[in-house]
Amino acid sequence: MADRLEDFQKFRADLNEEILGCGHLGMKRFFALDHQAYEPAAFLAAAHQVVGDAVVAVLRCDDCITYHLVRCGEEGWKRDEVIDALNVALIVGGSITIPHVRRAFARMREIKGLKP
Amino acid sequence: MADRLEDFQKFRADLNEEILGCGHLGMKRFFALDHQAYEPAAFLAAAHQVVGDAVVAVLRCDDCITYHLVRCGEEGWKRDEVIDALNVALIVGGSITIPHVRRAFARMREIKGLKP
Amino acid sequence: MADRLEDFQKFRADLNEEILGCGHLGMKRFFALDHQAYEPAAFLAAAHQVVGDAVVAVLRCDDCITYHLVRCGEEGWKRDEVIDALNVALIVGGSITIPHVRRAFARMREIKGLKP
Amino acid sequence: MADRLEDFQKFRADLNEEILGCGHLGMKRFFALDHQAYEPAAFLAAAHQVVGDAVVAVLRCDDCITYHLVRCGEEGWKRDEVIDALNVALIVGGSITIPHVRRAFARMREIKGLKP
Amino acid sequence: MADRLEDFQKFRADLNEEILGCGHLGMKRFFALDHQAYEPAAFLAAAHQVVGDAVVAVLRCDDCITYHLVRCGEEGWKRDEVIDALNVALIVGGSITIPHVRRAFARMREIKGLKP
Amino acid sequence: MADRLEDFQKFRADLNEEILGCGHLGMKRFFALDHQAYEPAAFLAAAHQVVGDAVVAVLRCDDCITYHLVRCGEEGWKRDEVIDALNVALIVGGSITIPHVRRAFARMREIKGLKP
């Protein structure tokens, strides 16, 4: 957990810009599809960030978890609701996800609305 | 896709009974926790089956997908909503999940309310 | 290995048609991107099927392996070259990939140009 | 669970012979290393099959689980001990491993010494 | 490998306390089950830490590996025995686990009884 | 991305030496097999580093990606070709691989011939 949230966000924005600007049309289109996947009209809109959160926690990707936690905070999810989503990931993914749950809790300390 | 839904459900019920009856307390408790994870009060109740569906599709587990599809059907989710959840799994998990998406579509043919 | 190659290909074509025809724009676009990923001008064109083959073997997806083996056969790859690609998957992915390597060898018995 | 244990073992023996006989030295050497990994002098010899069993269950490989269950039976492990190992896999790997645990229990019905 | 063992252990203890104290009963129960899974009466008690070590190495989780290495050291396992367990993980999980094996060797330099 | 390329390479060389010198014959042999897997006569030699790059990106191993990027640079691959290989990994592995693609782009800034 060496990186502060601010550093992570700067690195993320910087590299996303480089990737989207590198001229590879396939990558550009995939980034667009990835963005759209979380914004369906039919799908229960309110749930999408929490869904994403559980999905990426199960896949054990800290950067993705941080991204979704930040978005959950922005959309007004409550700490208890996020913890319920992390619990789904913990049970589905098993104890191998515990280090990621720990880092998710540590990251929530930096996010308004998700602090203990 | 050799097994029909009915066969899968019989095998699943039969073996779950054997596992829960084998006398191993740890396994019994984990099955209970797994059951409870999808029924939190705080968590957006309506979304839980769809969440589960996306999570297990990403993890590429056909039996789990079948189980969640059956539950989605029972709870009145619409075909379009389930397809949106499968799309999240497809984008997050990549083309490696395509065979599972195919089998999910094939399974929906057997589930009332999710048929094409 | 219950399914014959012919059955697999029929199931695959049938369900792909259903998925592409279900009206979900996101899925349709992803299938297009997936198709294009293996056809870059810059990338060493001749290698793409073998690359795909190694990648999906490591990810332990039998249907994907079958698909790429069929394509390797169509493009004139030799049995020895395909086995070299499977060996990369075996070493990178470890003994957990052995059952998939076995099924790949069994599948090659049905593919012209890749038979023993 | 369409395949009986006998069918699986015949397929496995048949294909292993084809792989080892295909003339690829790298694959042949890896198969030898894999075999030796479970027979170290320093490592607690008695535990190796159970270790293997837990490892492959976590990695969700049914064929590997079957192989290790057969070996556990041959070496005189008791049903309760094997269930304890499967429980480690269940807790470490989470509910995503439940279908594999079910199939492991079904397989044990065919293995002398591990039947219910 | 930026973090020293001492820093990791402080972070781990700190966050575990926050998780167990956050009031989520499901998480609390899962942590208890995880703890008990490694202490079965029937299972070969002496082997459990080494089993855990191989399992988590295959799953490529550095924090989990560190935790199990520390426990192996406390229980008197010898360096050679731990290396045998890491070798199982290497063969089962393939060369993709090599960076984790490297970090395991680096971590052993900090653990009494497991130093070179 | 705390570590500079130079630090990573020093750590890697240092620990590889310790592993190869620890006296475990199985590990030594596996390292040799891993090395040989990328040098087959039959396999399209020119493609092997790019293949390895796509494989390990899909498996989400940053250290492995760095290693293969360095080798791609040494062998004269062009930035566009490497980006095509990363795109295969992105499409096959899904958006969960995006953080690794970001770090791959960041690493290319340090590698002669792969800089933007």
Image: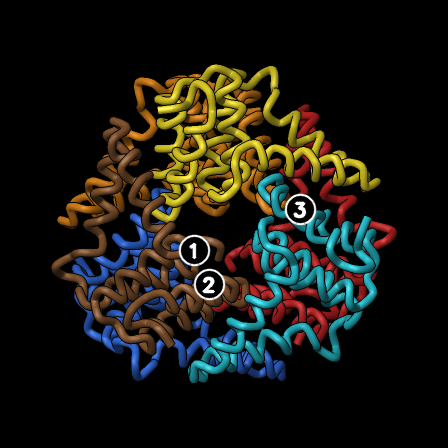
Chain colours: A blue, B brown, C cyan, D yellow, E orange, F red
Other residues around mark 3 within 10 Å, as few (<14) / some (14–19) / many (≥20): many
What residue does disc 1 label? B62
Q: Pinpoint the chain carrying mark 1.
A: B
**Front-most of F86 and A93?**
A93
Q: Are marks 1 and 2 on the same chain?
A: yes
Report the disc number at residue B103: 2
Helix, strand or loop under label 1:
helix
Circles 2, 3 touching at the beta carbon (< 8 Å): no
Circles 1, 2 touching at the beta carbon (< 8 Å): yes
Inter-mark Cα distance, 2 to 3: 22 Å
Q: Position of residue B84 (x, y in %)?
A: 36, 75
| Three-letter amino acid code of the residue under disc 3 | Val
**Front-most of D81 and A112?**
D81
What residue does disc 3 label? C101
Q: Pinpoint the chain carrying mark 3.
A: C
Report the disc number at residue C12: none
Q: Which picture quadrant has residue D89?
A: top left
